[in-house]
Amino acid sequence: MKHVLGIDVAKTKLDVVLLFPDGRCHTKEVDNTAAGFAVLSAWLAKRAVVDLHVGMEATGTYWEAVAEYLVDAGHRVSVVNPAQIKDFGGASLVRTKTDKVDARLIARFCLAQNPEPWSVPSPALRELRALVARREALIGMRTQEHNRLLVAREVVREGIEAHLTQLEKGITEVEAAIHRKIDQDPDLRNQRGLLDSIPGLGEKTIPILLSHIGGEPRFTKAKQVAAYAGLDPRQHESGSSVRGKPRLSKIGHSALRKALYMPAMVTITKTGWGKAFRDRLAAAGKPSMVIIGAMMRKLIHVAFGVLKPVLSLSKGRANPSTQRFMELDSDNSIYEYR
């Protein structure tokens, strides 16, 4: 039986709980720094830990450094959706919430569910993700300042306008850096070309898609990618009286859903295949928001379809099947977009 390590990740510290095969439990708190990682490694070595499975939640970006460190040390690491841990705790009737209790709950989840291991993305992909996240943050700040400017008094307008100018410059610089990063990496450059062949996807959306589903293979089925984005349908039925309409689960990356909304709108109004898709659903009586949600899911299915072959083939190999993926509609699940 293996050892299991649960880590509750915070910005400055890590609370860890080590479960032994005989049921014993040891706890430790270390800094979320390189020095803290070394302390954790020495602590594990002192306890003669072998065949270690480490679990942690995907909390912002604070988990990435320790996850990479532990993978490099030869341990199996699983990065779990926090919603899964929350549901597991609810099913286990866990009523107390502290960092150590959370770490123990994560360890118990890994022991019971044996989640898939996380693989370290390439340096180029990690840098692309950081740039994409920075761009989204700057755009969010720009939106906030635009809203403030609408109601600002004259005495502060000049400062807000100056900040907006700085933000525009920063966004332009980050977007240029994103294009350079993709151009410099052969795999990302090739994958960008494949995504660019999909009508409806543009230069703003493609880097976001690449940062989430590009690089190394992470998924084996399109449904997994849809679930990762929270675009999978959620059923709500019970007995014979409750028959709720299927809706988007929204248990996934909101930034990815946000990035697909406008491309879905453009696709169903400006492209031939998108209009046909829209008309077919409209003829079936589906409202407009249902159609948009269905197109968002369709787009991520198509994106995964054109990327999947090249992720496992040699560099530079073209994928001629973009049109085929757009024409196929094997999954007809329709749900409310709210």
Image (cartoon, rainbow, N blue to C red):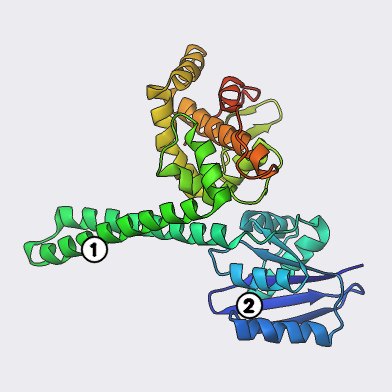
Residue that carries the numbered disc 2 in the rendered image:
14
> Residue 228: x and y, percent?
61, 46
- Which residue bears the numbered disc 1? 166
How busy is the neighbourhood of tag 1: few (under 14 within 10 Å), some, or many (20 plus)? some
- Which of the two discs, 2 and 1, sits closer to the camera? 1
- Nearer to me, 128 or 112: 128
Outermost residue, left direction? Answer: 154
- Can I make out residue 91 in this image? yes
Q: Position of residue 155 (x, y in %)?
A: 8, 67
How many numbered marks have been drawn onto this rendered protein structure? Answer: 2
**Residue 306 sits above or below residue 128 on the image:** above
Which residue sits at x=54%, y=65%? 61
Q: Amino acid at mark 1?
A: Gln
| SS class, disc 1 | helix
Q: Nearer the viewer, residue 293 or 237?
A: 293
Q: Residue at x 26, y 57 (%)?
A: 168
Question: Is residue 336 at all visible to an observer of this figure?
Answer: no
Task: Give coordinates of residue 65: x percent, y percent.
Answer: 60, 71
- Viewer-proximal residue among 326 and 40: 326
Q: Amino acid at mark 2?
A: Leu
Between 33 and 191, the residue placed more toward the observer is 191
Q: CA distance from mark 2 to mark 1?
A: 36 Å
